[in-house]
Image (tube, rainbow, N blue to C red):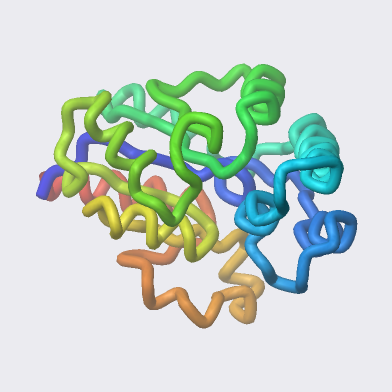
Amino acid sequence: MSLRGIIFDMDGTLVDSGLDFDAIRRDIGLPERHPILEGVEAIPEGPERERALEILHRHEHEGAVRATPYPGVAQLLERLDQLSLRSGVLTRNSRASVDTTFGQLGWTFDTVLTREDAPAKPDPTGVLAICQDWDMAPADVLFVGDYLFDLQAGHNAGTRAVLFVPDLSTRPEALPEWSDEADWVVGGYDELHQLIEKLGQES
């Protein structure tokens, strides 16, 4: 296996947007822990669904404006360029929110897909589309995310998957029960950087 490209999730992986998913569910009227996008899509077309979308977009916009990068992200992105590794983003967020966040941070990626561009994770369509755009086999790509859907989307497409758990070294209780779904678990971008360098040397 070689390493030729990295696909990142956005919220909770590249940036901390402070999104309160429980608050979004409450405002929309979804059950606790219910997937938000799937819950909104299940609402019949009409005023109720429009209201739910407005609530979701408001929360996402507020999160996009206040989003801050996790320590080490900018340095890693520079290193990926130096290593000639492709970088992409696949997010369940909206295009407007992504453009706001990346515009503020001055970040660019080879490919960025949002929920308007491909079925939401864990569907592998977005991952496969990025691999096709890069003319790469999924086995040569790494997917990095903070949630189960990220790992599942990567594995469903045939990539290897890294679970990102911020501050894991100081908060071991933050490790989710489904962490064994990941090929690797990292607690920060220093660890991810080391992993990428190691995989690059093995290529």
Q: Quadrant of residue 102?
A: top right
Q: Which residue is at a point 67% across and 68% down the rendered structure image? A: 34
45 in relation to 21, above or below = above
Q: Nearer the viewer, residue 97 or 74?
A: 97
Q: Quadrant of the C terminus?
A: top left
In the visual, does 16 lie left or right of 186? right
Is any atom of residue 66 visible in this view? no
Is any atom of residue 23 visible in this view? yes
> Residue 39: image x %, image y %?
67, 58
Q: Nearer the viewer, residue 136 or 188?
A: 136
> Residue 72: image x %, image y %?
55, 41
Q: Nearer the viewer, residue 41 or 66?
A: 41
> Residue 111: image x %, image y %?
40, 24
Q: Which residue is at a point 82% across and 55% down the rendered structure image? A: 24
Number of residue marks? 0
> Residue 165: image x %, image y %?
55, 63
Q: Which residue is at a point 42% across and 50% down the rendered structure image? A: 144
174 in relation to 120, above or below = below
Hey, which residue is sitting farthest right in the picture? 27
29 in relation to 133, above or below = below
In the visual, does 96 lie left or right of 155? right
Q: Which residue is at a point 84% across and 47% down the rendered structure image? A: 48
